[in-house]
Image (cartoon, rainbow, N blue to C red):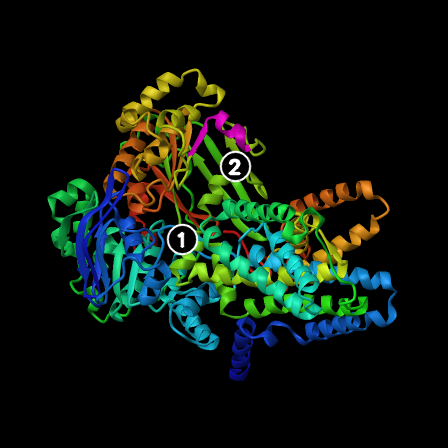
Amino acid sequence: MYRLRRMSVEYQKSRASQGSLLSHLSWLRWALLTLVLLALALLPQVADPYTIALVYTMFIYVALAQSWNLVGGYTGLISLGHAAFFGLGAYTTAILMTWANVDFYPSILASGLVASLFAVIISFPIFRFRGIYFAIGTLVLSEALRIWMINWSLTGGAQGINLPIANTPDPISFYYVGFALAIIATGVLVLVLHSKPGFGLRAIRDNEDAAQNMGVNTFMVKLTAFAISACIAGLAGGIYAAYLGTIEPYSIFSVDWTITAINTVIIGGMGTLIGPIIGTIFTTALSEGLKNYQTIHLIITGVILILVIRFLPAGIWGQLRNWLRLPGSTAREARKV
Amino acid sequence: MLLELENVSKSFGAVAAVNQLSFSIAEGEVLGIMGPNGAGKTTLLNLIMGAIPLDRGTVRFAGEQINGLRVSAICHRGIGRTYQIPQPFKRMTVLENLLVGELYGGRRQSHRTAHAEALEILERVGLAERRDTPATSLGLLDLKRLELARALSLHPRLLLLDEIAGGLVESEIEALKAILIDLKRSGMTMLIIEHLLSVLFDLSDRILALNFGKRIAEGSPEEVIHNELVIKAYLGTEATRGREELTTIQPGYADSGQQPEAWPDPPAPREPVPTQTNGQAASTNSAPATAAQNGTPLARIAHVSAAYGEFQALFDVSLDMYPGEIVALIGLNGAGKTTLIRTLTRGLPLKGGDIFFKGQSITRVPPHQIAALGIAQCIEGRKIFPELTVLENLELGAYCKRARGQRQQTLRRVYDLFPILAERRDQLGSTLSGGQQQMLAIGRALMAQPELIIFDEISLGLAPIVIDDLYRAIVEINRQGVTVLLVEQSVQRSLDIAHRAYIIEHGRIVLTGTAEELRQNEQFRRAYFGI
């Protein structure tokens, strides 16, 4: 009897301990995860170039969505300016590779750093705003950056920059670079969320004043989240630019990047790790399925977004988690009194 | 001295919220702060925590000047604070809420110890069983426990408690008090802001009374309660009640080594006492003649069951309100009081039963038409329109057709009831004090010319003297012929004016009778007065 009770206490302790990764993911999840990763790693050996390119694009979207998820989903900072980080990353790689003949890999690393630095600098004025004002502030910043790039002759103005083809890797290598980025983006979120900052971020999201009151230096925590998020978006931008071979400010700083990231996260499930991945699969499948009907594609996407927000407010994964009563679901033990 | 304030001042515009205030708290001491709404009590806490900058003066903690530091830094020095209105991290579990404090409270420690300590605190305040529940689904009592637990998770040297007992009924307050007394015995320094005198007097070594941001009295509880200024500005009739309470308290109760009671479970449902049949329960109070219960009830809740998802909140509840009556609904937090009211006013879908108003079933009437029938509600938290003037707020109350025609007469009636509203008719709602806002909310409800008016916890967070005024107004409203359903945290006060009362526990009506009968009832006294 005593042992049994003891074991159940231990079990509860381990279940409640969000601190350790191993206890959070059961062996079944580990097996599933390994299988999926293995399949993705071996995909280029068997798939045709179109599929490879498609999955590569999905990797980039996953990274971008996770990047937004960290600030939007977990910290409650609704950023409408992620296109700025993405675009800055793209321009950094383009400039370094074209003018300084820097190799591909160091260039994209620099992209991440530049975007991160930009995020840190704008944090000081932008964190004075909260809620909707923060959202508008970030939107204005990224639009301002776009207009500047259009008019700045040094970066090619509206024409943009053509990257040297010779220096860029082959499509298979790009696939693996994208793969690595998606894993890193998700992995960084796992690390952040399961350590001390994870509690700080979510506390800020739920109630910023109370978080300060509990000793959270909200400015520093927000700054860290913003910088990490920008770094991921910058890396994605750098890889994207090299892959495309040519960039111009209109599309690279387009607010579409931000909107796509937000859409993906909302459809998949805000503030969840798996949500952005599910969201990417869902939206990609949708646009693939509708690619022959360009005119109605956007209408259908819009309708689906409305339906998801109306009927699955927690997103596809968030809802699934509640139905399956997996850890982290809010439905478990939730009852209204 | 652990905390020292020197000539601290803070003004909002032309209003001096805190005015040249100096006081100090010694290590291990408990200082109580009392004063009317708008006396500057919560502002004082915000100034100490650094949430708002002070205009003049200094705040020192353990000898170090802390004003000017950021909130999180002040917290790291060892000050924990609870909010009057609970501010939990809603989407995090109860345990995670505490882990924030454990990890960010300024002490370096591993997740493992943070975890163990958080669980210990939850055990201490009686929340251990709910540790994996998201904070958003907690009831008020548990939210108050969480506020306290979260402040404790910082392992503070000084605890600032802002109306921790507000909104709780007597037996819940007793349980909370036991925890605080236990904390005091362990040597915790505390600053307590509280409207509930029993909490303030039992815990405080010294009491500071404020009005308009200034000290009006300071001293032991006995000294302060006899102070004329305090009685006039704040206590009102509660002064006599408070004195009685003081005499029943053993001197040095807090240090007597008496074991504090564990936080008790809410009383188990008892065998229901046979309900008084209509007509017999003649009221002993000075009931208006119309309160004779031989007619048909104005409103009747008949065998109602209701549920939120899987959670059943009401079981076969029946309740009658006769024309001209004041009916009190009494129960612990989470007993189903608010749910019961919602079945009346918000069209909460019923699982069974029926609701009648003036003989007609209103079970399927949509919520926005309820007001037009003559049912008005005055909800806790006041919910006035802050950006509209007093007059506009009142006029909006007469929006429905039945009231629009006689708007001017009703307005005069409301102004007679609350002359202060007439005085301030062109002022914005947000500029009124807490008590005046509540008067405005009542006035607005009256503008709809209701036949039945529901008061839901209207005295929450108000000074005793203001509550006196509100209760006089309720009696007057009732005398003018309006039937009243009163839901109130203070059982004493509601029994003082109610003709009959219903006791609700775990979603069931367990007891009903006249106010006098209930006061005589042994079980009831024990459950709700702790005597």
- Closer to the camera in the image, B228 or B212: B212
Residue B346: assigned label? 2
Q: Is B252 situated above or below A35?
A: above
Disc 2 is placed on an element classified as loop
Q: CA distance from mark 2 to mark 1?
A: 25 Å
x, y (%) of residue A173? 77, 70
Magenta segment main secondary structure: helix
Give residue B154's quadrant in the image.
bottom left
The magenta stretch spans residue B337: no
Q: Is residue A118 left or right of residue A57?
A: left
Residue identifier under label 1: B86
Q: Position of residue A148 (x, y in %)?
A: 60, 47
Nearer-the-camera pick, A14 or B485:
A14
Q: List the single residue furthest toward the bottom.
A: A3
Q: Which residues are magenta?
A: B367-377
Q: Residue at x 86, y 67 (%)?
A: A47
Mark 2–mark 1 CB contact (< 8 Å): no
Residue at far top of view:
B405
Q: Chain of mark 1?
A: B
The kind of residue tagged 2 is Arg
Indicate the position of residue B480 as horizontal and vertical percent values. 33, 24
Please give the chain letter of the residue carrying mark 2.
B
Is B374 magenta? The answer is yes
Label located before the other in sequence (2 or 1): 1
